[in-house]
């Protein structure tokens, strides 16, 4: 494991050792060199530059940076950039009452079993490596409290950084856990002062942060109620543009703490080890933990030292002379307590009911959201109504004069003078705006699937996958049957990547991305694929055409059966929402004789 994280850290370590031997202050014969002098003792990064002449190469080590090798474009990139600028100007306008948080999860840190796993390849070119699958891993979560500057030209890359390391197996990242972690970090950050009445969040568009997801909206409402904020604004980046998130800048610093370390868990009892050896995926481990009352606790204890190592290394990192802090994880009690705050709105809502289809069954919650929330593709906002008859909102904390002029964050509107740019924040703030100018909203939805048409047939359905948000079943297609090895890799990939409607199953660099496909021109609002009902693949069962529910299906009438060749299932919930049976293949008659009966 590396001794030092950086030149500064190396200097502090050596200085600390000298203080132990010679006390402080040092004798006049001991000199502490500067960071720059130490840096020049290493090999130059580029030996052909003029600067390289100043390096002595006393240490046979070269400074290298692992850069981003892949960056995709998005039609909404400019739109989201304007939206983020609006958010920053909003924070500047209400600076003294606002807390701005940028958050993100770093990729999982693998934990070795019998042999420690290093987080970087050794004796090889430094480049982005393929994802190696291990049973256990830890997910670092970054919460960045941004120091809001006094003007828009100021830096939004200064502030206090909190990092927590979660056990991926039993503490998976999800929206409600993130909200509990935000509340925990807020209580630490504002331990000696009043928590600001305005909270702004900026995150990427992952399944645990996507503002249009019901699970995320529920978690944000819980955070809004528990923190007693006057307004909460949650904003996300454009697709494939997580690099615009200020928390991403923290990842390069965090890499210093994770670079080159080798991690291995401690041994458990023989019984737990034997049980653990029989599990190959995260679901297997969780199922085994339900069978054994010791496996979960012993497994958490076995990685406790790994988490302590990561915490100690992280707290040695600095962002502009401010040390990183490691906050406690959100336990189940804290999550349950946080979710309990929404019971004042609808006591019948459970923590498992967080999809859009399930949320719309709770009329009280929908009524609250209609009165207090604004939902957009890239934002979700909640604001107190300041109505004395409202049984949900506590008294406002902002001065009345400020709150009366407080409005939701506006949608970007093209400038009248130059439609290539959006109007300034001050020109649109306080006005009624819509998403009508969002590029993807304006584009035609009739896009051709990027998958060969010959594959999108019922006979080439190889399995099914459930969306993490809407829980609708989607078909997985392949031109050929999967081998046993491909099936195992596919199952391991499902443990590592979260699938949502409209997204591919695998990243582009995964070899199965050219073997197995799902439709990408769909969303969570799209109904179940027609081909699902014609598939005879094991695991196929009747589900509602609109929401994917398998329970409470309604029987179609005899008259409908006589009129149509195909009638797709409908559940009681969708029928209650004024939806009708989706039908196909009307039976054309001539004198009440069906065309198919003609000979």
Image (tube, rainbow, N blue to C red):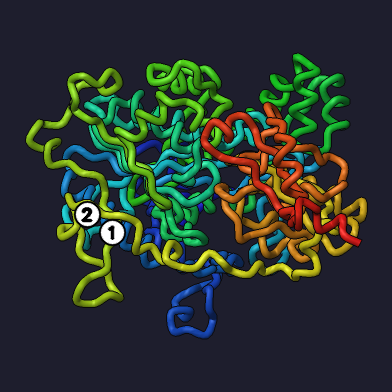
Q: What element does badge 1 sit on? A: helix
> Where residue 221 sits in the image (x, y, percent)?
39, 31
Mark 1 neighbour class, 10 Å CA radius: few under 14, some 14 to 19, many 20 or more: some
* Residue named by callout 2: 89
Name the side, left or right, on which 272 lies relative to 148.
right
Q: Is residue 242 above or below residue 216?
A: below
- The answer to whether the residue labelled 1 contacts the one labelled 2, judged by CB atoms less than 8 Å apart, is yes
Picture disc at residue 85:
1
Mark 2 neighbour class, 10 Å CA radius: few under 14, some 14 to 19, many 20 or more: many
Of residues 283 and 21, which is closer to you in this image? 283
> Where residue 521 sits in the image (x, y, percent)?
61, 61
Q: Residue furthest front?
A: 591
> Where residue 560 sits in the image (x, y, percent)?
70, 41
Which image quarter: residue 515? Answer: bottom right
> Residue at point 85% right, 25% down?
275
Query: Can residue 381 be seen in the rendering of this structure?
Result: yes
Pick the quarter of the image with the C terminus.
bottom right
Q: Is residue 598 above or below residue 92?
A: below
> Where residue 577 sits in the image (x, y, percent)?
52, 34
> Residue at point 74% right, 62% down?
513
> Residue at point 35% right, 60% down?
436
CA gap between label 1 and label 2 equals 6 Å
Q: Is residue 4 above or below residue 360?
A: below
Name the side, left or right, on which 171 lies relative to 177.
right
């Amino acid at each position: 494991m590396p001794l030092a994280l950086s030149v500064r850290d190396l200097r502090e370590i050596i200085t600390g050792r000298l203080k132990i031997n010679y006390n402080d202050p040092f004798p006049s014969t001991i000199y502490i060199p500067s960071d720059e002098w130490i840096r020049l003792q290493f090999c130059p990064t580029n030996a052909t530059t003029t600067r390289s002449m100043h390096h002595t190469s006393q240490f046979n080590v070269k400074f290298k940076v692992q850069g981003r090798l892949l960056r995709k474009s998005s039609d909404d990139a400019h739109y989201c950039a304007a939206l983020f600028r609006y958010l920053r100007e909003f924070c500047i306008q209400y600076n003294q009452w606002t807390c701005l948080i940028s958050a993100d999860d770093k990729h999982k840190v693998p934990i070795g079993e019998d042999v420690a796993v290093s987080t970087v390849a050794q004796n090889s070119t430094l480049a982005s490596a393929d994802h190696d699958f291990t049973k256990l891993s830890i997910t670092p979560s970054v919460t960045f409290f941004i120091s809001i500057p006094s003007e828009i030209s100021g830096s939004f890359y200064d502030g206090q950084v909190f990092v927590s390391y979660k056990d991926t197996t039993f503490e998976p990242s999800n929206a409600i856990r993130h909200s509990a972690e935000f509340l925990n970090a807020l209580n630490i950050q504002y331990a000696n002062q009043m928590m600001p009445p305005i909270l702004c969040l900026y995150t990427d568009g992952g399944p645990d942060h996507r503002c249009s997801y019901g699970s995320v909206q529920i978690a944000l409402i819980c955070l809004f109620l528990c923190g007693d904020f006057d307004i909460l604004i949650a904003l996300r980046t454009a697709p494939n543009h997580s690099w615009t998130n200020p928390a991403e800048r923290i990842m390069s610093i965090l890499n210093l703490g994770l670079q080159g370390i080798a991690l291995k868990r401690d041994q458990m009892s023989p019984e737990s080890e034997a049980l653990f050896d029989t599990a190959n995926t995260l679901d297997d481990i969780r199922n085994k933990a339900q069978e054994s009352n010791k496996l979960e606790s012993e497994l958490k204890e076995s990685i406790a030292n790994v988490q302590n190592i990561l915490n100690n290394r992280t707290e040695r990192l600095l962002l502009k002379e401010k040390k990183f802090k490691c906050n406690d994880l959100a336990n189940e009690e804290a999550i349950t307590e946080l979710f309990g705050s929404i019971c004042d709105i609808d006591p019948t809502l459970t923590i498992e009911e967080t999809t859009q289809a399930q949320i719309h069954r709770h009329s009280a919650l929908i009524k609250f959201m209609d009165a207090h929330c604004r939902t957009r593709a890239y934002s979700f906002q909640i604001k107190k109504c300041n109505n004395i008859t409202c049984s949900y909102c506590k008294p406002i904390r902002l001065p009345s004069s400020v709150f009366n002029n407080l409005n939701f964050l506006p949608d970007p509107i093209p400038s009248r003078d130059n439609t290539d740019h959006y109007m300034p924040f001050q020109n649109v703030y306080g006005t009624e705006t819509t998403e009508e100018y969002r590029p993807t909203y304006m584009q035609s939805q009739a896009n051709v699937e990027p998958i060969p048409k010959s594959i999108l047939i019922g006979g080439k359905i190889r399995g099914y996958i459930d969306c993490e948000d809407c829980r609708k079943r989607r078909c997985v297609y392949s031109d050929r049957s999967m081998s046993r090895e491909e099936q195992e890799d596919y199952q391991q990939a499902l443990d590592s990547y979260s699938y949502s409607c409209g997204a591919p199953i695998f990243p582009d660099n995964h070899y199965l991305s050219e073997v197995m496909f799902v439709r990408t021109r769909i969303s969570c609002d799209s109904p179940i694929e027609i081909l699902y009902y014609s598939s005879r693949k094991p695991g196929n069962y009747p589900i509602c055409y609109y929401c994917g529910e398998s329970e409470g299906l309604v029987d179609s009438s005899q008259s409908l059966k006589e009129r149509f060749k195909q009638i797709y299932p409908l559940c009681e919930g969708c029928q209650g929402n004024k939806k009708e049976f989706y039908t196909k293949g009307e039976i054309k008659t001539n004198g009440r004789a069906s065309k198919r009966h003609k000979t």
